[in-house]
C-alpha cells in the first residue's frame, strides 16, 4: 500500500550500504548552505503573514481565499517533510537537499510572477516541498559533523527554524515598503537558487540506506482529508453550513480520516506511527503541539490584519505592514529568550508543570487580546506574554517526546511532533478564517466581534492544551512506556525530572 523507492525491500530502512569512501567537504561551507536553506524555508513561512491583506487587494480576492496562501504552505510542508526525509535516506540527503532548494526557488519565482491568487496558492504548495530541508539538514549534520560539534550544530539549526518565523514577520514590512510584495519571493528565490548550486557542488554525497517503502498512500490520504476539512471550514459561511457542498466536504473528510488511520496501522512504513502515538508521553506532547500550532499560526495569520484596520472600524490602529510586524516582534524575542531557561525550569520543576504553565500563560494572553486591545501597549504586553508561554512550551516538548521513546525512534518521533504542530496550524488558520469572515461589517471590513470570537477560540484551545499537559508522564512512567531493551539506556539519558 506504499510506493517503493526501488524494487528491493528491508525492514531496516536506515542500514547503511557499503560504498566507496565519500568525498569530504568543508564543514563551514556545508553548515553555511544548511543554515541558508533552513532560514529561507522558515522566512517564506512567515514573511507573507503581515501582507495577506495587501495580497488580497493586489490580486482582488477575499480574506478567506487569501488565507490559503498561508494554509497551503503549511499543509504542503506537513505532507512533504517526512516524505522528503525518507527519500533522502535512500537516494542521498545531498541530492534531495538540492531538489528541495530547487523547489523553493521555482516556487518563489512562480509566486513572484503570480497573476492570480490561485496561481499564488499553487506556488506556495510547491514551496512547501522545502519543508524537507529540516530533516535533511539534521541528517547531513549527523553524517558530517564530529560528535563533539554535532549537538551545537543541531541546536543552532533548530533555533533558526523557530526564530526565523518572527524575523520574517518583521522584515516583510521594509521589503514591501521599498520594493513591493513580489520581492518577498524574489529575494528567497535568489538565495535558495545560489544555495542549491552550492549544495550540488560543495556538500559531499550522503551515505545511502537500503531500499525501503515510502508512505505514499498514507500521505495522499492525509492530504485528501485535510484539504476537504479545511476547505469545508473556510468556506462554510460563504456556501452555508447546511449546503450540499459543505456537508459533502466534511463527510468526506471524516470518512477519509478514518481510512487514513486504518491504513497507517497496516502499512509497513507509516507516515505517522499510530503504535508510537499510544505512548502517553508521545500522544500528550503531540496533542499539546497541535493546540499550540493551532493558536500560533491562526493568530499570526490574522493579528496583522487586525492591527492594520483603521480605527474607524472600531478596532485596529491603522498600522502599516512594518508597524504590525513590530507589534509581533516581542513575541518572537520572548520566545527565543525563554529557550535559554526552559531546560533549567524543566530540571527544577519537571516538564509536566513547565509545559502546563506555558500553555496557561498563552491562554491568558489570548483572552487578554480578545477583550483588551484598545491601546498599543496592551498588544505589546500580551504578545510578550504569549512569547514567554510559547517559548517554554516549544523548548520543552521535544525533550518529553525523546524521553518517551527508544533511541532508535527519536528522529521519527521528533519529526512527527513537528508535523502535527504544522497540521494544527493549517487547521487553525482555516477555522480562524471561517470565524472572521462570518462577521463582516457594512464597511466591508471584518467586524470586531469576529476577531474577539477567534481569539477566545484560540484561548480555549490553549486551555485544553494546559489540561492535556497535566497528563504528561513523569520520569518513571516515561521509562516504563519504552520497549524493554531500551529502558536502561533511556533512563540514563533523561533529565533528572521530566
Image (spheres, helix red, strand yellow):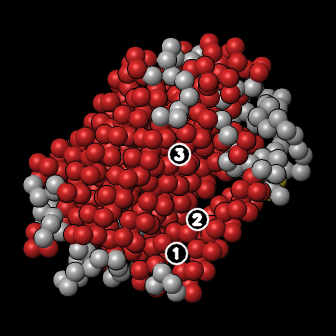
Q: Secondary structure at mark 2?
A: helix
Among numbered discs 3 and 1, the one appearing first in the sequence: 1
Camera-side residue: 150 or 78?
78
Q: CA distance from mark 3 to mark 1?
A: 23 Å
Residue mark closest to the camera, 2 vs 3: 3
Left or right: 231 in relation to 111 = right
State the separation of the CA atoms marked 2 and 3.
17 Å
First reached walking from the N terminus: tag 2 or tag 3: 2
2 and 3 marks in contact (CB < 8 Å):
no
Mark number displayed over residue 466? none
Report the residue marked by disc 1. Answer: 232
Q: Position of residue 155 (x, y in %)?
A: 47, 28
Mark 1 Cα shell of 10 Å, populated few (<14), some (14-19), many (≥20): many
At x 36%, y 59%, the residue is 457
- Residue 205: % across, % down: 68, 36
Q: What residue sits right under mark 3 in the picture?
A: 287
Amino acid at each position: 500500500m506504499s510506493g517503493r523507492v526501488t524494487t528491493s525491500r528491508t525492514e531496516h530502512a536506515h542500514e547503511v550500504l557499503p560504498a566507496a569512501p565519500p568525498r569530504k567537504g568543508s564543514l563551514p561551507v556545508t553548515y553555511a548552505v544548511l543554515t541558508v536553506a533552513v532560514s529561507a524555508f522558515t522566512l517564506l513561512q512567515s514573511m507573507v503573514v503581515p501582507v495577506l491583506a495587501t495580497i488580497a487587494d493586489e490580486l482582488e480576492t477575499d480574506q478567506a481565499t487569501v488565507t490559503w496562501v498561508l494554509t497551503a504552505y503549511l499543509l504542503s510542508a506537513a505532507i512533504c517533510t517526512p516524505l522528503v526525509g525518507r527519500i533522502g535516506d535512500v537516494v542521498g540527503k545531498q541530492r534531495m537537499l538540492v531538489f528541495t532548494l530547487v523547489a523553493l526557488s521555482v516556487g518563489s519565482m512562480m509566486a513572484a510572477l503570480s497573476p492570480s491568487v490561485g496561481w499564488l496558492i499553487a506556488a506556495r504548495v510547491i514551496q512547501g516541498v522545502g519543508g524537507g530541508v529540516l530533516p535533511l539538514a539534521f541528517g547531513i549534520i549527523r553524517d558530517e559533523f564530529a560528535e563533539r560539534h554535532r549537538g551545537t550544530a543541531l541546536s543552532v539549526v533548530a533555533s533558526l527554524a523557530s526564530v526565523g518565523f518572527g524575523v520574517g514577520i518583521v522584515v516583510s514590512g521594509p521589503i514591501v515598503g521599498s520594493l513591493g510584495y513580489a520581492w518577498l519571493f524574489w529575494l528567497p528565490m535568489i538565495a535558495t537558487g545560489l544555495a542549491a548550486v552550492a549544495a550540488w557542488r560543495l556538500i559531499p554525497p550522503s551515505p545511502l540506506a537500503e531500499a525501503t517503502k515510502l508512505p505514499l498512500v498514507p500521505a495522499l490520504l492525509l492530504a485528501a482529508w485535510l484539504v476537504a476539512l479545511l476547505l469545508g471550514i473556510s468556506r462554510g459561511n460563504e456556501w452555508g453550513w447546511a449546503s450540499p457542498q459543505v456537508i459533502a466536504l466534511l463527510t468526506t473528510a471524516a470518512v477519509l480520516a478514518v481510512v487514513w488511520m486504518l491504513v497507517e496501522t497496516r502499512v509497513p512504513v507509516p507516515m505517522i506511527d499510530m503504535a508510537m502515538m499510544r505512548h502517553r508521553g508521545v500522544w500528550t506532547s503531540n496533542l499539546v503541539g497541535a493546540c499550540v500550532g493551532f493558536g500560533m499560526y491562526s493568530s499570526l495569520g490574522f493579528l496583522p490584519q487586525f492591527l492594520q484596520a483603521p480605527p474607524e472600524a472600531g478596532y485596529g490602529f491603522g498600522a502599516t505592514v512594518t508597524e504590525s510586524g513590530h507589534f509581533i516582534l516581542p513575541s518572537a524575542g520572548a520566545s527565543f529568550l525563554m529557550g535559554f531557561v526552559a531546560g533549567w525550569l524543566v530540571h527544577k520543576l519537571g516538564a509536566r508543570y513547565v509545559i502546563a504553565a506555558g500553555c496557561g500563560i498563552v491562554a491568558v494572553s489570548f483572552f487578554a487580546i480578545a477583550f483588551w486591545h484598545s491601546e498599543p501597549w496592551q498588544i505589546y504586553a500580551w504578545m510578550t506574554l504569549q512569547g514567554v508561554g510559547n517559548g517554554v512550551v516549544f523548548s520543552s516538548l521535544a525533550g518529553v517526546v525523546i524521553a518517551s521513546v527508544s533511541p532508535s525512534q527519536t528522529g521519527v518521533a521528533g519529526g512527527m511532533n513537528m508535523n502535527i504542530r504544522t497540521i494544527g496550524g493549517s487547521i487553525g488558520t482555516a477555522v480562524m478564517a471561517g470565524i472572521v469572515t462570518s462577521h463582516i461589517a457594512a464597511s466591508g471590513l471584518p467586524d470586531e466581534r469576529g476577531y474577539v470570537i477567534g481569539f477566545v477560540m484560540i484561548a480555549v484551545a490553549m486551555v485544553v492544551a494546559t489540561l492535556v499537559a497535566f497528563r504528561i508522564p513523569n520520569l518513571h512512567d516515561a521509562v516504563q512506556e519504552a520497549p524493554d531493551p531500551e529502558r536502561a539506556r533511556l533512563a540514563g539519558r533523561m533529565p533528572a525530572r521530566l
